Image: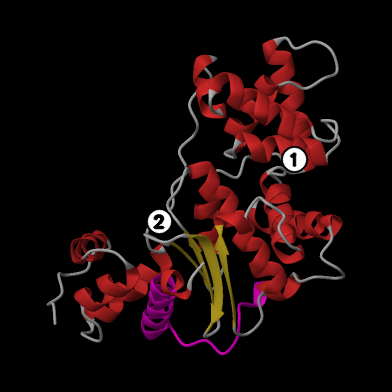
Amino acid sequence: MADSEREPTLDRLAGFVEAALKVLPVRGRLPDWLDQFGLQGPETYDEAERLAADLRTVLYPGEVDSPAVDLPQRLRALDGLIVSQLKNSKFEGASVAAGGYLFVFVSPRFPARMLFTLGHELGHVVAHHSVQSAHLDLASHIGSFRNRVEGFADAFSSAFLLPPQAVGGSLQAIRQFIGASGNEIGDVEILILARLHGVSFDVAARRCENLDLLPPGGAASLAQYIREHYKSPEKRAEALNLPPREQIHFDLVSPLLMKFVHESVARGETSPSWIADRFGTTIESIYETHASTGGRRATTH
């Protein structure tokens, strides 16, 4: 990608982080919870599985089988982590460590894509972020296993969103429900698995292949078959009258960050117009969220 195409997003990211650090409390270091993670060896598939399982234990204690469709909301509990959307960008996602905070950005896309991107960025957070660092991911970086670092983040996301126990238990229940016979897993089971866990068909199929539930190349073959005969997995699911996907909600701007925005605006330290410009939101939205927390409408500077 040419530099002229990259600069607008980079400028917006820098402006967002700069504005956030202006209103957030000063921190001397990255969050303590991050210390319990980190690579213990090379960026292998097994290491991605281990780290994903460790983070699941923190975010979904006692819920190893639970679909992570509410992951954006669960992440609010992690100290110092700011998750927001990245609008009007060719980047799928980004993660930045700065000023003692961790910032994760996800571009508005198909919700299942956004959820996988969120998991991908979390993989970067727990494995690759130090005091001051950044990862920006184009579409070609996510889901393609293009290089070691991005492939590791993909493997982490897949393992986090589709833990082995969850895949096995879900597929057993799905096959019983639809009356599937034989040992082979077909496209219908994977379509339901994908919808249940909030991921795309391709992600679910690749995960099944990685867990040896499909033969090598089986995921690509099923995906090609569906696109040749039904145009897309979603159209195939609709033709089967499968239940709709559960909605996945992504905050435009982190509620934690907005709390401190409201306080800063109320004190007259920042103006709603300045915040709106840097966070890619509107003055009206800032006023609305401010009022919803009991604040008074601030004067625009």
The residue at which mark 1 appears reads as 207
Residue farthest front in this picture = 2
**Magenta span includes 48:** no
Image spot of residue 281 (x, y percent): 28, 64
Q: Quadrant of residue 214?
A: top right
**Amino acid type of the residue tagged 1 in the rendering:** Arg
**Magenta span includes 10:** yes
The residue at which mark 2 appears reads as 251
Q: Residues within 10 Å of mark 1 (few under 14, many from 20)?
A: many
Viewer-proximal residue among 273 and 80: 273
The answer to whether 200 appears left or right of 291 in the picture is right
**Amino acid type of the residue tagged 2 in the rendering:** Asp
Numbered disc 2: secondary structure:
loop
Q: Residue at x 66, y 76 (%)?
A: 129
Q: Do the CB atoms of the residues marked 2 and 1 lie less than 8 Å apart?
A: no
- Residue 84's place in the image compared with 6, above or below, is above
The residue range painted magenta reads 7-33
Magenta stretch secondary structure, dominant:
helix
Mark 2 → mark 1, Cα distance in angstroms: 27 Å
Q: Quadrant of residue 189?
A: top right
Residue 6 in view here: yes
Viewer-proximal residue among 256 and 134: 134
Numbered disc 1: secondary structure:
helix
Viewer-proximal residue among 207 and 218: 218
Residue 166 in view here: no
Image spot of residue 13 (x, y percent): 43, 74
